[in-house]
């Protein structure tokens, strides 16, 4: 169970808890920035902030908050042999800073929003934990001004979003592949929702029947957005592609043979679409590995999108 699911379940049970968050870390610290641990009033533990004797002491400190509540605070842990006020008991070198947040049912609305959000930005500071739902997350940041003022922002949820136009057999295979790769997958088609491959696609997070004339309004912009066009008809591919050529997205690909691609591109040029817009389209889609089956095509598309994502 993920940390936020665990927190949500406890708060729904009206169980108080302390969330420990590693705000920053340095050197060979065993607890890295963003590590989390939950200590509940009914005795459960979830997660880790580094382990060992240090973690044991931090858990004991967290448990004392149930008897003497206090506002959020941070504690520095130095991992070396010297015995100082901030010594962790570990000798692996480095250090880390942990924030303590006592949460009760008043935090439940935020926990519920976190559970249902596809993506967003979490902010931890000296007053509270806040969440903003957005697919276009700002750069993560951390600053510790002093023991009473700090901020950590981090991404929550999915980082990459794949939009598939066409709900056929290849779409199912691509959805399966990208589900394993951690993408949030949305499938669109303009046929009846009773289409067998549309109904059987259990890998997509969302599935929608739309009019392809409305394609543009369904696709956001940003470096987190990837689109693959694989509809059942050339005219649909052409329509969807035309609606997306002006979009500022990370990847736009269209499935088809070289002959089909040439035909679609020629038709769009004849309607006044500049060639430089068509040149940015990955088509024929994917890496050229001689793919034949839907699963092989999915591998080809995945390899190309991973190359674009990491490049």
Image (spheres, rainbow, N blue to C red):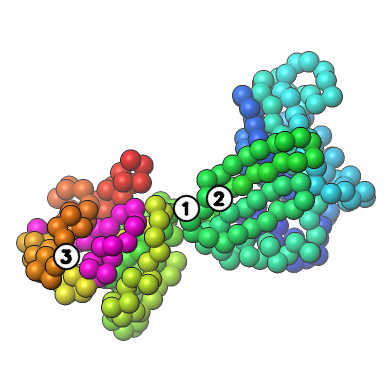
The Cα atoms of the two marked residues, 2 and 1, are separated by 8 Å
- Queried whether the magenta region covers residue 119, the answer comes back as no
Quick check: can you spot residue 282? no
State the residue position of label 2. 155
- Asked if marks 3 and 2 touch (Cβ < 8 Å), the reply is no
Q: Quadrant of the C terminus?
A: top left
Tell me how far mark 1 sits from mark 3, CA to CA: 31 Å
Residue assigned mark 3: 273
Tell me whether the residue at label 2 lies in contact with that at label 1, contact meaning CB atoms closer than 8 angstroms.
yes
| Residue under the image location 89 percent in, 50 percent down | 69
Q: In this view of the protein, which residue sits in the foreground, 159 or 42? A: 159
Q: Which residue is mark 1?
A: 159
Q: Give the tally of numbered discs.
A: 3
200, 23: nearer the viewer: 23
Q: Earlier in the sequence, mark 1 or mark 3?
A: 1
- Examine the rendered structure and indicate whether residue 152 appears above or below residue 163: above
| Residue at 72% over, 36% down | 145
Question: Residue shown at 20%/58% (left/top)?
Answer: 277
Q: Closer to us: mark 3 or mark 2?
A: 3
Q: Which mark is residue 112?
A: none
Residue 132 position in % (x across, y down): 60, 59
Q: Which residues are magenta?
A: 240-258
Which of the two residues, 58 or 44, is positioned nearer the viewer here? 58
């Amino acid at each position: 169970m993920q940390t936020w699911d665990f927190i949500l379940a406890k708060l729904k049970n009206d169980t108080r808890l302390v969330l420990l968050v590693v705000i920053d870390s340095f050197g060979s610290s065993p607890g890295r920035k963003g590590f989390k641990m939950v200590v509940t009033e009914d005795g459960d533990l979830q997660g880790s902030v580094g382990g060992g004797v240090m973690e044991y002491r931090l858990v004991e400190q967290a448990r004392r908050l149930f008897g003497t509540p206090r506002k959020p605070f941070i504690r520095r842990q130095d991992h070396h042999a010297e015995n100082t006020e901030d010594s962790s008991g570990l000798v692996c070198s480095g250090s880390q800073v942990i924030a303590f947040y006592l949460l009760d049912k008043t935090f439940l609305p935020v926990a519920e929003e976190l559970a249902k959000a596809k993506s967003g930005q979490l902010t931890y500071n000296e007053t509270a934990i806040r969440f903003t739902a957005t697919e276009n997350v700002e750069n993560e940041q951390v600053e510790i001004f002093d023991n009473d003022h700090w901020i950590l922002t981090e991404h929550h949820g999915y980082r990459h979003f794949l939009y598939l136009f066409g709900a056929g057999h290849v779409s199912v295979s691509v959805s399966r592949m990208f589900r394993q790769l951690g993408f949030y997958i949305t499938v669109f088609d303009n046929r009846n929702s009773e289409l067998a491959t549309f109904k059987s696609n259990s890998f997509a997070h969302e599935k929608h029947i739309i009019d392809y004339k409305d394609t543009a309004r369904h696709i956001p912009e940003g470096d987190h957005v990837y689109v693959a066009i694989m509809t059942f008809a050339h005219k649909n591919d052409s329509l969807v592609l035309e609606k997306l050529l002006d979009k500022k997205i990370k990847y736009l690909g269209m499935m088809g043979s070289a002959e089909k691609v040439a035909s679609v591109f020629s038709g769009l040029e004849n309607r006044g679409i500049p060639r430089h817009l068509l040149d940015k389209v990955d088509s024929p889609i994917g890496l050229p590995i001689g793919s034949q089956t839907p699963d092989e095509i999915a591998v080809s598309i995945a390899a190309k999108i991973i190359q674009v994502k990491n490049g």
